[in-house]
Amino acid sequence: MKKNNNSAQKIKNTASKFALNINKMPAPFKKLLRGVFAALFWLAVWQLIASAVGKELLIASPKAVFARLGALCVTGGYWSAVFSSLVRVFGGYLAGILFGLVLAALSAASALLESLVTPLITAIKATPVASFIIIALVWFETPRIPTFTAALMVTPVIYGSALTAIRSVDKNLLEMAQVFAFSRVKTIRRVILPSMTPYIRSAAVTSLGLSWKAGIAAEVLCTPKGSVGRYLYESKIYLETPDLFAWTLTIIGASLLLEYIIRALLGGRGRGRK
């Protein structure tokens, strides 16, 4: 019994020292360690579920999925599909930002225009993504549908944030600009845009994930050649579960990469986030 107590005390002391060493680490290393731990935890959960089910057709094991992902990564078709999907969705993302900013500026300038724009934004937010995709199948050629869908998902988010930002500009700063006889362009550049930046930055990051998911969903339904959505759809049709999981991991990875790039380009984490 005494030997068991000594062993338990040694384990406890080792764990305490390990926790103490972690607390002494710099913040970036602690964050990385927590991320690695979380990833390993969910991989273990995934493996346990796959082992319990015992049917790769339903749930492929991590080993099978990562093996298939590794095989895909060395093919030209894989990277071509990822690149083409990124171009389509990112094009719609930029178009949605521009459209949302223009609508917000018009609404801020005129109450009449705002009353006309508001029903459009409300309809976009209330309508299911699948409905827009099906309608777009009638209107556009297949490769343009993911771009159109991504733009629609971004527009309401940017519009709402931009309109709030314009109306939140400090009135004292606007009065100061008048006192110093700033031109309209200079007032926009020196007063309005700096006040809007945190709102737009946050909305741009938030809407990126929405546009990417909507764009891929559009590709799954309209299946343009050489796209991630098409390969995802074919994996489901032919019951290739490891491929299905591998392409899903690709979608997640691409989304995280896009968000990292956007955050880096915008130079911040968004309003209210530290």
Image: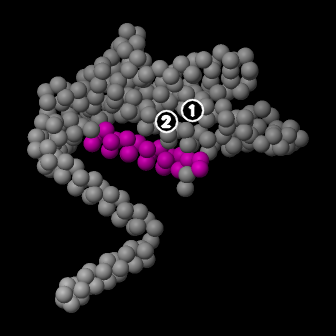
Q: Residue at x 35, y 65 (%)?
A: 33
Q: Is residue 270 magenta?
A: yes
Left/right placement of residue 159 relative to residue 25 reads: right
What number is the disc on residue 54? none
Judging depth in this view, the residue of 110 and 84 nearest the camera is 110
Q: What element does badge 1 sit on? A: helix
**Residues rendered magenta in the picture:** 249-272
Image coords of residue 163 (percent x, y): 66, 31
Vertical comparison of 34 with 244: above or below: below
Neighbor class of circle 1 (other Cα within 10 Å; few <14, some 14-19, many 20+) is many
Residue 24's quadrant in the figure?
A: bottom left
Cβ atoms under marks 1 and 2 closer than 8 Å = yes
Q: What element does badge 2 sit on? A: helix
Neighbor class of circle 2 (other Cα within 10 Å; few <14, some 14-19, many 20+) is many
Assign the N terminus to one quadrant of the image: bottom left
Image coords of residue 192 (percent x, y): 72, 39
Judging depth in this view, the residue of 52 and 35 nearest the camera is 52
Q: Amino acid at mark 2?
A: Ser
Q: Residue furthest front?
A: 1
Vertical comparison of 6 with 110: above or below: below
Precedes in sequence: disc 1 or disc 2: 1
Left/right placement of residue 79 relative to residue 68 reads: right
Q: Residue at x 27, y 38 (%)?
A: 248
Q: Residue at x 73, y 24 (%)?
A: 109
Q: Amino acid at mark 1?
A: Ile
Q: Main secondary structure of the magenta part?
A: helix
What number is the disc on residue 207? 2
Determine which residue is flagged by label 1: 158
Residue 107's quadrant in the figure?
A: top right
Q: Is residue 202 magenta?
A: no
Taking the image as drawn, is residue 186 in sight? no
